[in-house]
Amino acid sequence: MKDEHVDKNLVTQLDSAFIRKDPYGVVLIIAPWNYPIHLFLVPLIGAIAAGNCVVVKPSEIAKNTERLVAEVLTCYLDSDCFAVVTAGVQETTRLLENKFDYIFFTGSPSVGRIVMTAAAKHLTPVTLELGGKNPCYVSDTCDVQNVARRVAWGRFFNAGQTCIAPDYILCSVEMQDKLMPALREAITEYFGPNPQESPDFARIVGDKQFRRVRALLCSGRVAIGGQTDEKERYIAPTVLADVQPSDPAMQEEIFGPILPIVVVADMDEAIDFINARPRPLAVYAFSCDSKVVNQVLERTSSGSFCGNDTLMQVTLTSLPFGGIGNSGLGKYHGKFTFDTFSQHRGCLHRNMGLEAINSLRYPPYNQQKLGLMTATFEIKRRGMCTLL
Amino acid sequence: MEELRGHQPLGGDAGTAPEDEGGTSGNPYAGLVSRLRAAWLSGRTRPLEYRLAQLEALGRFLEEKKQDILEALDLDMRKPPFEAEFSEVLLCKNELNTTLNNLSCWMKDEQVDKNLATQLDTAFIRRDPYGVVLIIAPCNYPIYLLLVPLIGAIAAGNCVVIRPSETTKNSKRLAVEVLPRYLDKDCIAVVTAGVQETTRLLENKFDYIFFTGSPSVGRIVMTAAAKHLTPVTLELGGKNPCYVSDTCDVQNVARRVAWGRFFNAGQTCIAPDYILCSVEMKDKLVPALREAITTFYGPNPQESPDFARIVGDKQFRRVRALLCSGRVAIGGQTDEKERYIAPTVLVDVQPSDPAMQEEIFGPILLIITVASVEEAIDFINSHERPLVVYVFSSDNKVVNQVLEKTSSGSFCSNDTLMQVTLTSLPFGGIGSSGLGKYHGRFTFDTFTHHRGCLQRGTGLEPINTLRYPPYGPHKTGLVRAATTVKRQGECALL
């Protein structure tokens, strides 16, 4: 919260120049259903820390969490300054007609557009944490067992309903052949021979979402899993082989426990594949060769990047978290959340006296004044000699 | 009559007119944007050497074409050469040199703190360019407000489309015909576009849009950006209040406020728009302002070479119409042929007067009387949040009170305009005065995507097994220990 003092020029040497962190005012946080507590609380933490009043709209799809937030949270917070609203699609549209001083939205790109368009009417700044298909390039030089475990963990955690989960693998046909048994082994290790019986594997959040994800199964060839149970909204940890770019599973973010493998010839083809598509929240690259990892990092664009693992980048509160392009705009976590909800106000306190110095800048103008103004205000290119 | 067609190319491909780049989609700029996107994907704009070369070329443009710049601004709005050289050339060079001096440092990966689980990993923030960015510049400082964002966009490694203002025709011609000779045309394009074409231009997908202009057009830009989820910086405007307390040096206040108001004939987004003060202070200020104006511009400012003109006929008529507000205490003369409006002070202005309904953006200073600093603060807070709040007082407590109880893009006490000469202060608006910030390093940051990066080892798998299913209480405890961030000051017996 402290004022941040900044460098001054010659003219302002005796002044006080600093950046004041001001709150925006009344801010709106719209949270999604996949991590319904984390994804409303973490922005709320930053909004409160920055000094704002907050309206929180938890997801109406995660009904029990919604009730918890609406009924219980207000017992802990100052209800004059913090409000929880419950709103479905229609009501959220009405809510967005109001003028907020900041809007923080986590959800899909299509709704992100609607939120930003509504915000534009009031010139309200926004952070949009959206989604996309996070590619996972696996090079031929890697420890297949480790890769399989780390990718499977990232993909099947929360039954795949994680915005930064690896969405699809890009690898050579040889690597696909090696990965498949390793993935099978990892899935069995995690969830047992029948994952439906494992207490450690989640379900799809709702019927509509279940049907959407299930429809993606007819892509490529089911190599592992593929079973579903509509009553439980269960979709087995599934790996699809030989998936084509035109398959259903490659047309949208999967957001479920399905891992497609798309075969590419080499790293260059993988990079081109990634760059031909909307920019994702995360790019993952697995390789023992750090040159390969760095090439993928340098030649692609994404919200975040992680080499040789999945999801772990979000455990660091020191790393900014956010998207780019279709996957979002703005960033948060740690201090970045505070900064998101703060306005950085440039402040200069000058002296009422010392007017003589100022007269240089006043009309009537002349060359001599201009020369002196230049001398006192200019910032020189370093490394250029000046004979003083 | 406003130009609807593009410019006249000076041989070769200086600038781009809509008809040159007809794409199959029917959008006249689609070809240009995809050409730049291809250049972007080639990676050409990313190396430090490339960026420095483009920036240094910009520096040569400012050096070699300084006279042309001053002449263009003189023709466009009779901007006094002193003002042009200071605000459009010098301040711009300062931004350029700040960037050249620091770019390699700004570009570096920023290593960040790690938790226990990631101790052996590399965690850093990578500064990535956005890609193809669009900069739309206004007419009041047509060189500065075009080049300063451009400096940051290039420094950040982007390909850039810049659209200079249509209103300042001579400055526009410089931007379209001369500037491209200095820059890599494959990666930096100058387009001319009136209102209609700008709407078409905005239909294209850009990776960042930087707009300086009015709030109403800002809304249009942001709405267009929303279709592509394009992040934006909007540098807009508003009415910048200037509270003058009873404890101040009236002469100094009058000079500093007059300077800020009448510089560039008032066409400055951060100019003091209206004064709030007590009746007693008003009675002291008016003669002091009269004296300052006479010192600056002589008894007949229309004859002074140091006072600019309004930039266009439409704008002249708009500002002139504001004169029927309150009572003219100083000035009030106009000359339509020259687009001259005298340095004017209006008193007894009511909140319902025309001059209080919109940003003045002209050489008219209003004085509104209030009973106290609290009433001034309430007045300010009942209006849209401005780019700047100004306060004049010898009493620091008063200055701080206004600072703390108001909200604005920036704040300056006991002077006007000076905050923008510091490249270390962020410059931007809040609410209807804008969103985003720039100047100095903030421009670089504006056009940069901060990419969180974690590079882990391929081995050390046993540590990871803590997090894998099957889950158990022993695992939960260890995972928590490895990743928890404790509240400082809490004892932990290990």
Image: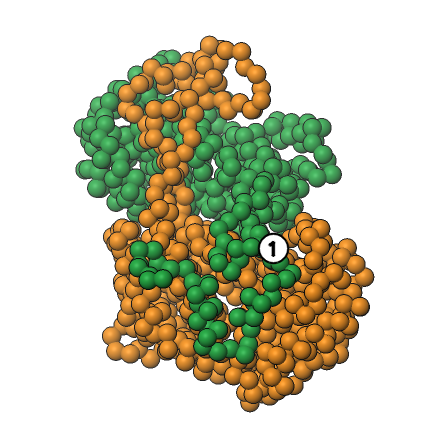
Chain colours: A green, B orange
Q: Is residue A92 above or below residue A151?
A: below
Kindly give the residue lying farthest to the front in the view shown. Answer: A388
Give x and y (percent) for residue A208.
50, 34
Q: Is residue A53 above or below residue A371?
A: above
| Number of marks present in the image shown | 1
Task: Farthest residue to the bottom: give it.
Answer: B337
| Amino acid type for the residue under numbered disc 1 | His
| Along the viewing direction, whichever of B101 and B378 lies nearer the viewer | B101
**Circle 1 — which element?**
strand
In percent of width and height, residue A275 lies at 30, 46
The chain containing the residue under callout 1 comes to A
Crowding near the residue tagged with mark 1, few <14, some 14–19, many ≥20 C-alpha atoms within 10 Å:
many
Q: Residue at x 57, y 37 (%)?
A: A46
Residue at position x 65%, y 27% in the image: A68
Q: Is residue B81 visible?
A: yes
**A11 versus A72 height, above or below:** below
Residue B327: horizontal and vertical position, in percent?
Answer: 75, 79
The residue at 59%/34% (across/down) is: A45
Whether residue B273 is visible: no
**Residue A201 falls in image quadrant:** top left
Viewer-nearest residue: A385 or A349: A385
Q: Report the residue at 66% width, 42% height from top.
A: A53
Place residue B16 in its image quadrant: bottom left
In the picture of the structure, the residue carrying the numbered disc 1 is: A349
